Amino acid sequence: MIKDEYLDQIRSGKESLSLEFKEASQDIPKNVYDTVCSFSNRNGGNIYLGVADDGMVTGVNPEKILQMKKDFVTAIQSPIKINPPLYLDINEFDLDDKKILHVFVPSSSQVHRHGSKIFDRNEDADIDITNNTVLVQQTYIRKQSEYTERQIYPFVNLEDLRGDLIDRVKKVAITQDANHIWATADHIEILKSLGMYSKDYINGREGFTLAAIITFGKDELIASVLPYFRIDALLRIEDVERYDDRENIRTNLIESYERLMGFVRKHLPSAFYIEGDVRINVRDVLFRELIVNMLVHREYSNAYVSRLIIEKDRILVENANKPVHPGIMQKNQIEPYPKNPTIAKVFNILGLIDELGSGVNKIFKYAPIMFGEIPLIENRDIFKVRVPKKQDNVGKTNDVSEELPVKVSLSENQKIVLESLNTAMSARELMEILNLSDISHFRRNILNPLLLEGLIVRTKPDKPKSSKQKYIKANFR
């Protein structure tokens, strides 16, 4: 179902600095990549395919949609087409009895080219500024000043980064797409495509960025570059003056996420919720969004210590911030703005981020289910999420089946699946390992019981029937 926000944009019938309509009945228009580039280089925006310049819905041929999606994703992830590559979703909606496609393009921390050309957005037009050295220079300066993650450290070497973490992200990307451009890429090529190795065209400095350091850096490198970087996870139930348990984290963002999720699972019970015909672990979904938001959208030039605190009557999450729209955030009124889009790309590949802005809406959705209260979210210099807890509601939800015993008897096939899921894999890939052909039997007797036990999770938990759905061992998320 199309969002009211999207519907209002189309009904306005007027393109703007951040809104573009394209007629596209059979294939992706070539000039859509000019707009992708200009939106990325300016303030971001929404592109609607199957809509005329005046907002009239002309539609997309339903039989062409799958191929159009594939063509678009392949193009924007190719450095030959868009450089550095982008990782965007293209979604379909029904409107006026027709199909349309929608792409949200966030503002990027990098300057992107379509082919050899740099585009900027002016009013409702994509402007080629490649040969205008003043405008190109202004674009680079704007990106450097807006995004701390873009700061370049020319004396950091590849050996200072964790190759195993880069390989891990590469493996996930290739598992999702066997033809991914990273299939034959080395570490430096991967980091360049992510925008984590960059050149400042103003002063000529070249090297790894802060995003590379904080995402893939060895602990000693992170401590040298960001000596103040720390995340405190505290349990304060009995000892409210100090703490009952504490996790002091000073490591890369990928393992920071895993340690924070481990802390949550240690101290809060699972809560399973029936959504449609899917049983989800509300605790894991809610805290995934809280923790990813803390890590990905933190302002890393600020020494404020990020904190996740579990108290008797509330959950508190805090991190340094650079607010674009300061104030109290309201449900379904989120204006997405990527604080660290390069870091966000990595978490998107790992399946921990979906559409920009959706994370906060999920916090509003699942916090009341888990804890019985509406969260308060303050978007100021310190980003704060306060989730009040009703004590008789923690770990209990509506429409919940009784949680199964932790100790379960696994079949040999289930054990093989668990051993295989240290990296994300699709149902078909798992069936090939087991040499099975009946997918109904596989789902009913092998896959679904593992999901219900919480031993494995979906990489796209909110889209259980997605054609790109994969599964991974729970403690590897």
Image (tube, grey):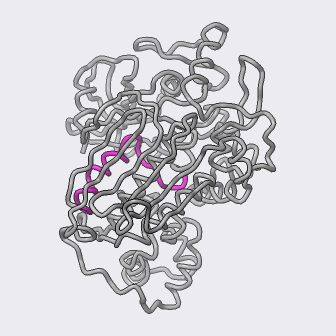
- Which quadrant of the figure has residue 193? top right
In terms of image quadrants, where is residue 153? top right
- Compared with 113, 417 (above or below) is below
Question: Is residue 349 something one can see in this rendering?
Answer: yes
Q: Is residue 350 magenta?
A: yes
Image-based side of 220 in relation to 361, left or right: right
Query: Where is residue 32 shown, x and y percent of the image?
Result: 48, 27
**Image spot of residue 313 (x, y percent):** 27, 60
Q: Residue furthest front?
A: 241
Q: Which residues are magenta?
A: 349-371
| Snapshot quadrant of residue 404 | bottom left
Q: How many marks?
A: 0
x 34%, y 31%: residue: 50
Residue 371 on image: x %, y %:
25, 61
| Residue 195 or residue 159, whichever sits in front | 159
Task: Indicate whether 47 appears above or below 433.
Answer: above
Residue at 51 percent of width and 27 percent of height:
40
Q: Is residue 185 visible?
A: no
403 falls in the magenta region: no
